[in-house]
């Protein structure tokens, strides 16, 4: 397939906006050739042609930490007094909503998020799943939805002791089963990967951490929340006399493939330890603000050599929105307009997220337009009215781009949306089904919340 009449934004090691008249050829899911389009048309006259109509053609966005399972929280009222701190938010909202999910709830929570991702140009997502009353097989249910959508994703089940040791063991087994499935390398699973999910230090005993480490195969990363709220540090100090990162390090959780989400309350020693381990840390400013947990020392982490990526923690799959919140939050928090510049946001959301996904997908380059890279692309209908070049592109994104401008989404060379028409998922059918299922989920939520 040829993509013609687009303005190519390459990202990658040397970001470029290609001059008009350049196109690309997609073959077997990768960008095979980037060349002047006359040359492409001459060399591949039989290829299907996709007209970008002057829009920007750029790599799809990546979300390094999300929770499909939280989708039905939208508009959900929490009974009783509103939560007054992060642990109450967990207690009153998330740990009741996840229990209310059955298999259909898991399926439709995922499907609505995948629709949202395709519409808004997020082509790869790393999910962290919980459904304590529907654990066994839940990752297959989500995987089916991901395969149907055509997106790229890594899945895991968040193991926790908070619902008893039986459920913790079921969570461990669900991760192991799914990791095994992925390692079988079935053709249909080409866009799927697996992590070993763990909830957070504060709901994990030494025994469960030790058992998870001993069973998780080499080369598979853990995916865990770390020091999101101060309670995680207090609990860790009480349990072990160590701060969260050191406790996780002790149990071998800090693999180079591992992802720690948030790290809002890390001290210098933990940041150093994280850099040394080479684990990933993901930043989710919208979630941090919503939970009022604090501001992570992201720039300090980058300076220390921590590999920082960006997720959305279950907020909408609009990653430029997350860019904007990061760009603004750190300036306000430090009352310093020099903080969190556009290049820093780009480094996190583009460079580091791409490196994270490439390492997951066996070195396949993603997040860049280059020959041999995955054909994970979006078309953006943005008409600049000030000069735009590779150097100031981050600021055009921060102040001008909207996810509603995404008109086409392509993953591994397959069109998932074109001219704003979804091609793999039926949004209205999914929304109608989800409406019914979320209603039932909300009823169970109320019962569970009433018993808590
Ligand atoms: Zn999270």
Image: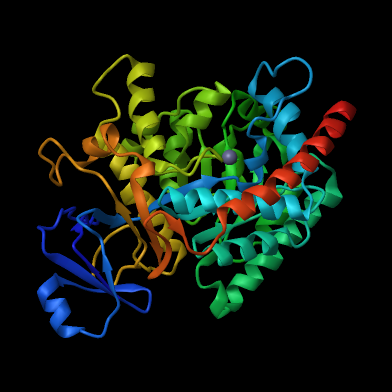
Image side of residue 204 versus residue 265, left or right: right
Please tell me in which quadrant of the rendered image residue 66 appears. top right
User: Could you tell me if residue 53 is visible in this image?
Assistant: yes
Tell me how the rendering is colored.
Answer: rainbow
- The residue sitting at 28% across, 48% down in the picture is 381
Please tell me in which quadrant of the rendered image residue 211 appears. bottom right
Extreme residue in the right direction: 451
User: Please, is residue 401 above or below residue 136 in the view?
Assistant: above
Q: Quadrant of the C terminus?
A: top right
Give the percent coordinates (x, y) of residue 335: 32, 14
Give the percent coordinates (x, y) of residue 9: 21, 54
Image side of residue 34 versus residue 122, left or right: left
Q: Quadrant of the N terminus?
A: bottom left
Please tell me in which quadrant of the rendered image residue 199 appears. top right
The one of 393 and 296 positioned closer to us in this rendering: 393
Ligand 1 quadrant?
top right
The one of 381 and 88 positioned closer to us in this rendering: 381
The one of 309 and 239 positioned closer to us in this rendering: 309
Give the percent coordinates (x, y) of residue 154: 54, 59
User: Could you tell me if residue 129 is visible in this image?
Assistant: no
Give the percent coordinates (x, y) of residue 53: 22, 58
User: Please, is residue 242 above or below residue 218 in the view?
Assistant: above
- The residue sitting at 75% across, 61% down in the picture is 173
Image side of residue 12 versus residue 445, left or right: left
- The residue sitting at 47% across, 48% down in the picture is 64
């Amino acid at each position: 397939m040829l993509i013609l009449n687009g303005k190519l934004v390459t990202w990658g090691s040397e970001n470029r906006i290609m001059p008009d008249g350049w196109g690309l050829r997609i073959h077997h899911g990768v960008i095979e050739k980037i060349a002047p389009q006359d040359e492409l048309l001459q060399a591949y006259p039989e290829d299907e042609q996709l007209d970008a109509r002057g829009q920007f053609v750029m790599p799809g966005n990546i979300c390094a930490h999300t929770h499909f399972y939280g989708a039905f929280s939208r508009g959900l009222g929490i009974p009783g007094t509103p939560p007054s701190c992060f642990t109450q938010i967990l207690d009153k909202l998330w740990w009741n909503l996840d229990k209310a999910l059955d298999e259909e709830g898991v399926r439709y929570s995922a499907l609505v998020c995948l629709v949202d991702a395709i519409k808004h140009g997020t082509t790869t997502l790393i999910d962290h799943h919980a459904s304590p009353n529907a654990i066994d097989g839940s990752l297959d249910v989500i995987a089916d939805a991901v395969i149907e959508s055509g997106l790229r994703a890594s899945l895991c089940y968040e193991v926790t002791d908070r619902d008893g040791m039986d459920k913790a063991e079921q969570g461990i087994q669900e991760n192991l089963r799914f990791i095994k499935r992925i390692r079988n390398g079935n053709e249909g699973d080409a866009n799927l990967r697996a992590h070993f999910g763990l909830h957070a230090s504060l709901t994990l005993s030494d025994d469960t951490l030790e058992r998870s480490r001993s069973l998780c195969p080499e080369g598979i990363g853990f995916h865990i929340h770390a020091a999101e709220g101060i309670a995680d540090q207090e609990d860790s100090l009480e349990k072990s006399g160590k701060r969260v990162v050191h406790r996780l390090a002790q149990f071998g959780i800090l693999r180079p493939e591992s992802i720690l989400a948030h790290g809002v309350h890390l001290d210098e020693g933990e940041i150093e330890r994280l850099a040394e381990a080479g684990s990933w840390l993901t930043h989710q400013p919208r979630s941090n603000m919503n939970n009022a947990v604090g501001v992570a020392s992201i720039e300090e982490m980058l300076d220390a050599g921590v590999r920082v990526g960006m997720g959305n923690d279950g907020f909408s799959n609009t990653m430029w929105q997350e860019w904007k919140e990061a760009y603004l939050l750190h300036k306000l928090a430090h009352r310093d307009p020099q903080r969190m510049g556009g290049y820093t946001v780009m480094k996190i959301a583009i460079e580091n997220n791409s490196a994270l996904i490439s390492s997951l997908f066996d070195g396949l380059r993603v997040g860049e337009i280059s020959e041999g890279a995955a054909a994970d692309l979006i078309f953006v209908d943005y008409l600049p009215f000030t000069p735009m070049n590779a150097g100031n592109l981050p600021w055009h994104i921060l102040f001008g781009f909207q996810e509603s401008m995404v008109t086409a989404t392509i993953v591994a060379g397959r069109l998932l949306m074109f001219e704003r028409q979804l091609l793999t998922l039926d949004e209205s059918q999914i929304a109608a089904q989800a409406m019914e299922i979320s209603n039932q989920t909300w009823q169970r939520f109320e019962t569970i919340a009433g018993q808590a």
